[in-house]
Amino acid sequence: MRISSLLKVLLSGFALITPLADSHAQLTLTSAGSNAGFGLSTVVTGFAPNGNIGPLGVVINPNGKLLTFNYGNQTFYQFNDVDNQTISSNISTVVPGHDVRAMTVSGSTLFEANWNAGSIERLNNDGSLISTLATGISTPHGLTTDPSDGNLWVTTLNSGTILKINATNGAVMKTISSGNADGISISKDGSTIYGAIENFVKGFDTTTGAQTFSVGVTGVDGTAIGSGSINGYLFANTNFGESSPYSLGNNSQINTSSWFAQNMTVVPGQPVSQGVKDFLAREP
């Protein structure tokens, strides 16, 4: 697995990644992260920040390119999805004239949360505007796609709700009273929406709106759902340059120190582990 970081984008952690000094500077992968099979790479450097804020959103667009919005100069940048680029490696730039807080892809369409206008908009792959989908959304901040039907979920940071928006006509399909939510993610079956909400990660049933999950995370800013070998875990990153995994089964932070570490214990008279078998069968 690969954790890619745009310089100034904080996906770092006390469980998987830690900042060496300034939490907005160099990141280092912990031994727990390495044991879990993660890698850490830098995709693009050279963004001009505004204070300590640089790129706010990043998405792989329908063309398979990486698109990010840099808060520092209010500009969309499009890149190839490869490591070790500089900002001058960009394929295109677009200045939209407003503040973008999040992006998501549904089918072959790219969407953005327009903070200034209180709207969700359809975009071309380079970030230029196609059309407005929905208006009247107070401080739209987090945005994700429902995998069960392709519609959108958006947080209203200062209004205490998470809204489900029809991706075709912009109608509000569902309103969940959540508290002031920042970044969001959704389960693979679309049954639970998770939000970074006032020092907690909370989960809500997307049908009933009932809260089903809660774990305290000081300074939480964003969430992500694990897949593959880390299926069943939710990852939360904070404004302090940290990130940790949490079990979706028991609402608890996970100790990742032994993730995927080989069991090399040998007990006389007992079958040996696969790790020992692999060691004994290694090439000379």
Image (tube, helix red, strand yellow):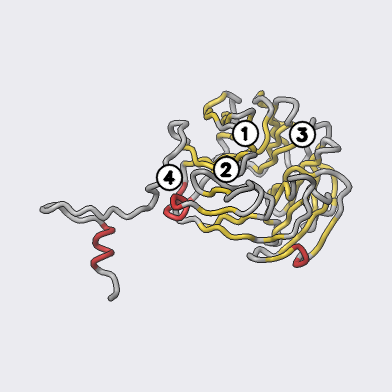
Disc 1 versus disc 2: distance between alpha carbons?
9 Å
Decide if residue 265 is in sight here: yes
Which mark's residue is nearer the viewer, 1 or 3? Answer: 1
Q: Position of residue 23 (x, y in %)?
A: 63, 46
Classify 10 Å Cα crowding around label 4: few (below 14), some (14-19), many (20 and above).
some
Please name the residue that numbered disc 2 is placed on. 242
In the rendered image, the vertical position of residue 3 relative to residue 256, given as above or below: below
Q: Residue at x 27, y 65 (%)?
A: 279
Q: CA distance from mark 2 to mark 4?
A: 14 Å
Name the one closer to the observer, 261 or 140. Answer: 261
The CA distance from mark 1 to mark 4 is 21 Å
Amino acid tagged 4: Thr
Q: Amino acid at mark 3?
A: Ala
* Element marked by disc 3: loop
Give the residue at mark 4.
256
Circle 1: element type? loop
Q: Amino acid at mark 1?
A: Gly
Disc 1 vs disc 2: Cβ atoms closer than 8 Å? yes
Q: Are marks 3 and 4 in contact (CB under 8 Å)?
A: no
Drawn side of residue 161 relative to residue 191, left or right: right
Q: Residue 143: x and y, percent?
A: 70, 41
Residue that carries the numbered disc 3 in the rendered image: 171
| Residue underneath mark 1 | 219
- Does label 3 or label 4 sit earlier along the sequence? 3
Residue depicted at x 76% and y 60%: 78
Q: Residue at x 16, y 51 (%)?
A: 267
Task: Report how many numbered discs are placed on residues in the image.
Answer: 4
Give x and y (percent) for residue 223: 59, 40
State yes or no: discs 1 and 3 in contact (Cβ < 8 Å): no
Amino acid type of the residue that numbered disc 2 sits on in the rendered structure: Glu
Marks 3 and 4, how far apart at CA: 42 Å
Q: Residue furthest right?
A: 97
